[in-house]
Image (tube, grey):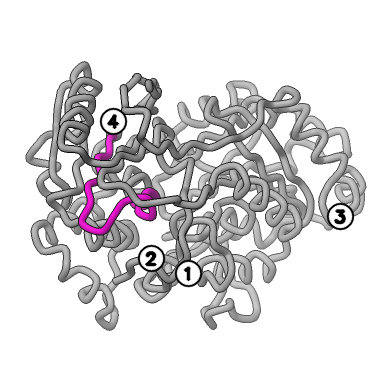
Amino acid sequence: MQLNFLYDRGVFPLTLPDSAHVYASSFPQPAAPDAELVARALDAPCGTPRFDELLARRRAGKVVIVVSDITRPIPYAAFLPQLLARIEAAGVPRRDMLLLVATGMHRASTTREHVEMFGADVAGQYAICDHRADDAAALAPLPGRSWSGAPIMLNRHLVEAGFRIATGLVEPHFMAGFSGGRKAICPGCASLDTVRNFHGAAFLSDARACNANLAGNPLHLEALSMAKALGVDFTINVVLNQERRVVKAFAGTLEAAHEAACAFVNSCACPPVPRPADVVLTSSGGYPLDATFYQCVKGFVSCLPAVKPRGTIIACGGCTEGIGSAAYTATMGAFSGRWRAFPAHIRGAGTFVKDQWQFQMHCRALAKVGTKHLHFVTAGLRTEELRTLSVTPCSVPRPAVQSTLQAMIDKAVAAGHSLAAFPDGPYCAPVSPPTEVTVL
């Protein structure tokens, strides 16, 4: 059989034996254009009156709309203009509206990215601000403590807003169970210290911090507690198919809308594993998810339930923006060849490095298959760079990515190995009981 694998901004076909188990999402085709699906959700929200009614009795202050950054492929340009027009029609002038980009600890968006994400008209006519987790002047405290007992410090615009709208993409998330909902607030608009706790070694050492699980998941509980302490007036969560089109939108209260979205995604993108395979081939989800190696980690961690212990993972990703942040790149280099020392290192008192959580999750893959059996194919990084990233490196020119992967598949088939494939990467997340998750 032939499957199309997502890579960078395109796809390429690979031929696998018919016996290979394919893990792919099964989302329905969109029943209407993106903007209409979102409008329907606004008119029939979960657990709350209609959107327009809520806006009519908003508090004094700006209407702040939290939006995701460039790493999430939400087609905002297809529905955001209509949403903003609806807010204006409810009597909110543009000067009292703010698009707050929930960057978490990612870099700030560029002006060009604002145009790409929201469209030229929105980018040129509405105020847009990128959250800065490390800017004390841009943060404000909330009374009380989070689920874990930590102080709550969030973006000042959000804290001082008269009406708060959180938007997001709901998909399987390899740490928080599912993305969307409360994650727009934490870590999206939280302080650096909050993110350190949220992504800390203790939270990620919990086996319940895995794909498709919210029950007892410390990341979910922490984020939800902060979003509830803030008070989110309305949420809009979208679900996308492989073509990055909205197939379903869920609007309403923070918890009800998110829970409904998670149940839908779970039914479409989180299949059980019938039997682990000797070799798993996975995409990293294509652009923008595979723009850095940092993001590509999600692909080979999400496929872990589908591979046998000491089996082989073959992953690919564009990496057109390199490895990731300077801190992440330095950490990967410092522990190159000695990844087993990393989990103990980050448990040390006072030890925290930006983006350490991604390597901690990466270590789950290494604990199951080992560096030798974790192959990464890319045209975006040089061999010497890949050698610092605790993978078996395979750097090839862009035209050779497809043929290189096909040769690796053919070799596995010739050796009699069983195969599993993830053509969409982490957009499909197979599940196994949390007790089977290898944590460090």
* Residue 315 included in the magenta stretch of the image: yes
Q: Quadrant of the C terminus?
A: bottom left
- Asked if the residue under mark 3 is in contact with the one under mark 4, i.e. CB atoms within 8 Å, the reply is no
User: What percent of the width, then of the height, locates residue 304?
Assistant: 35, 53
- Asked if the residue under mark 2 is in contact with the one under mark 4, i.e. CB atoms within 8 Å, the reply is no
Sequence-first disc among 4 and 2: 4
Residue at image mark 1: 208
Residue at image mark 4: 320
Q: Is residue 196 above or below residue 250?
A: below
Q: Which amino acid does the dot numbered 3 rest on? A: Thr
- With 305 as the anchor, is 264 left or right in this view? right
Q: Which amino acid does the dot numbered 2 rest on? A: Val
Q: CA distance from mark 3 to mark 2?
A: 37 Å
Q: Which residues are magenta?
A: 301-316
> Furthest-top residue in view?
399
Can residue 252 be spotted in the picture?
yes
Q: CA distance from mark 1 to mark 4?
A: 32 Å
Q: Secondary structure at mark 3?
A: loop
- With 363 as the anchor, is 27 left or right in this view? right
* Disc number placed over residue 437 in the picture, else none: 2
Q: Quadrant of the N terminus?
A: top left
Q: Which amino acid does the dot numbered 1 rest on? A: Arg
Sequence-first disc among 1 and 4: 1
Sequence-first disc among 1 and 3: 3
Residue at image mark 3: 48
Q: Nearer the viewer, residue 388 or 374?
A: 374
Residue at horizontal 74 percent and vertical 25 percent from the top: 31
